[in-house]
Amino acid sequence: MQKPFETGSLNKAAENTICVLLIEDDESTAQEIQIELNLHGFVVTWINNGRDGLSSILTSPYDIILLDRMLPFVDGLTILTTIRKEGIDTPVLMLSALSEVDERIHCLRSGGDDYLVKPFASEEMAARTEVLLRRRNKQLHGTILSVLDLHLDVVSRTVTRQKKTLDLLPMEFRLLEYLAKNYGQIVTRTMLFEAVWGYRFDPGTNIIDVHIGRLRKKIDSDGLTPLIHTVRGLGYILSENF
Amino acid sequence: MYSVFFALCIILLLISVYWQTTREMTKRVDLTINLEKDNFLNIPSSHLPSRVESNIRNDLRHIYIFSFFNKDGSWLAGNLKHIPSSLSIDGNIHQLIFSPYENTTTPIVIRIMAVRIKSGETFIIGRDVSELIEFHQMIKNTFLLWGAFIIISGFGIGLSLSVRPFNRIREIQRVCKLIMQGDFKQRLPITSSRDEIEMLTSIINTMLDSVERLMSEVKSVSDNIAHDLRTPLTRLRAFIYRSQQEQSKDNKNLMLEKALFEIDSMLSRFRALLRISEIENGKRRACFKTFNLSSLLKQATTFFEPVADEKSITLTLELCDSQKYLVGDEELLFEAIANLLDNAIKFTPAGGFIKVTLKSTAHGPTIHISDTGIGIEEEERNAVCSRFYRSQNNDASGHGLGLSIVTAVMQLHDFEFKLEDDNGGTCAIICCWSATLDRFIECD
């Protein structure tokens, strides 16, 4: 698994190179996104208007699309509904300055996979992109999620480490489940709050940190290889070698 | 009120007419008696007996009483054989009830006068007013009957006529409630009637047009400011973040970290400001749906339990009903309760208690979040809900907008929200029913 912050080679033509299509009309935003995703090893194609963006999607395959809502010629929502009608199921991360709940729901119902309100932190965008890619790759299809000697059974809702059953509260299990499903990827506090509690606002203070701290005490007890790591300023990652 | 006034006027009118009529008729009778008295006083006493008999003969209706008595009270002439014991010989008219004739014992009502002349004899003049009394009674009965009919039918017609305007007022009340909740697009209903309510409705609608336009202008200015400041700040943040990433792990610049922290703090404030603006605009009303309030409170307390536990604060939840449902924006209410719990934990010292209670009242459910914290001074309880206000016992962390968010959420839902003292601590109370409708109900 490639570690974050390592500069990826932009000249890779390997089959497993992640190709990102960015359709964004604001140059500085686009540049920032490109820099961040390049650091994650992604190859980014940038198109600054909706008409050419739609054409590109229909003619070339991409692993993921970052799509601005308001675009010249053809707006992002029209692009989204068009490609879904065509049967293109590439994950789409909508980027929009419109923060209303109705707008977000509308975009998600039109086929968007996630929605990020501008202005956003680059690392938040990168983390959400990685999560969508992971979902696309469907790496975790089984009912048992395993990381080193930690096993999580999503059906029976049990967790074992070194064959010893751990007593987790329901919320702790859901936290761990989300981390495990995104094993090796950084997830931000906002993403955790949204995925586990289902709410999309800033919970403030350090509540998520406290919940993770409690979970860590149960998962990474003394003597065991730490699996839950804090990425300062970003979020958390579940990995055996971080 | 007008109906009562109308009824009172009718009653006074009828009483006045009755009284005037009876008084006038009695006055005329008395006038007749007095005229006869004057005639008798002008006649020499020796001629009085014959005059008395003459008057009796001329009284074809037999309604008058004329009698003449000697000095000793013995009868001399007339149709009344004795002076009634209850009649004073004072020359004044009195109304008596007695049987004046020998051939009948039926008492009748008589207006009667007894006059003693200079020579010592007494003459009596009287008139049977039984017919008059019967007439008075007939008028009285008629007035009572028709008066009651007029008053009752007046009330009935008044009530039926007021139903339509009352229904219009209720409809106006409903729309006003929506407007007060922030939906400035609503307008009062216009009908085809050209009455005072219609004139007032038109004026208010015009006023609302102006208010909506002004609010929109003000809102767009403040939103633009917040939004426009967010973008350059985010870019600045990206620049600092990028600089930070380019440093090696062993050579972290703490100043960059602090700068990043400060910018994140500022961005958090702007996000909160814009969120309050969005809530206050009522744009979230579209997300109202029925949800389980009991589950929401359970989720909120579970969410904050680890934080409370870290501070050795006991956080408990008491539900009156595990299936209490409410219509509202579930996410916003969770955020509001999260802010209140966050404040409670912040301002309660270690070892303290926070209790979340869901109670059921006649109006609807109430949520109480009480703590054993440092409390809020009475004069500050309104001010702490203002944006950026910090209490005297402020905590340095946070953006000071938590209670503003709570207030905005409560206003969107039209719930009453108050902060009260609780044995030195604070109790935040949310009354989960429409405050405006309740006030209107009390006025009915």
Image (cartoon, rainbow, N blue to C red):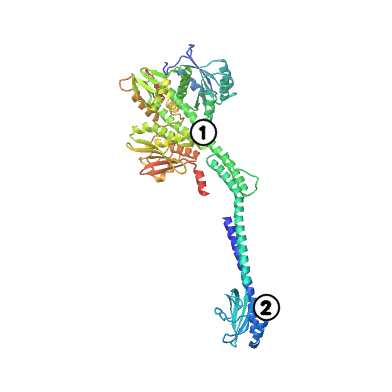
**Of discs 1 and 2, which sits in the foreground?**
2
Front residue of B268 and B333 = B333
Q: Residue at x 58, y 60 (%)?
A: B8
The reply, left or right, for residue A80 in relation to residue A147 is right
Q: Which residue is mark 2?
A: B59
Task: Kindly identify the amino acid type of the residue bearing the numbered disc 2.
Answer: Asp
Q: Which mark is residue B186?
A: none
**SS under mark 2:** loop
Do the residues at discs 1 and 2 belong to one chain? Answer: yes
- The picture places residue B218, in percent across and down from the top left corner, at 54, 38
- The picture places residue B369, in percent across and down from the top left corner, at 40, 39
The reply, left or right, for residue B160 in relation to residue B288 is right
- The picture places residue A161, in percent across and down from the top left corner, at 34, 20
**SS under mark 1:** helix
Instruction: Measure how far apart labels 1 and 2 are at the Cα level.
Output: 97 Å
Q: Which residue is mark 1?
A: B287
Q: How many marks?
A: 2
Front residue of B273 and B324 = B324
Q: Residue furthest left?
A: A223
- The picture places residue A226, in percent across and down from the top left corner, at 34, 20
Q: Are marks 1 and 2 in contact (CB under 8 Å)?
A: no
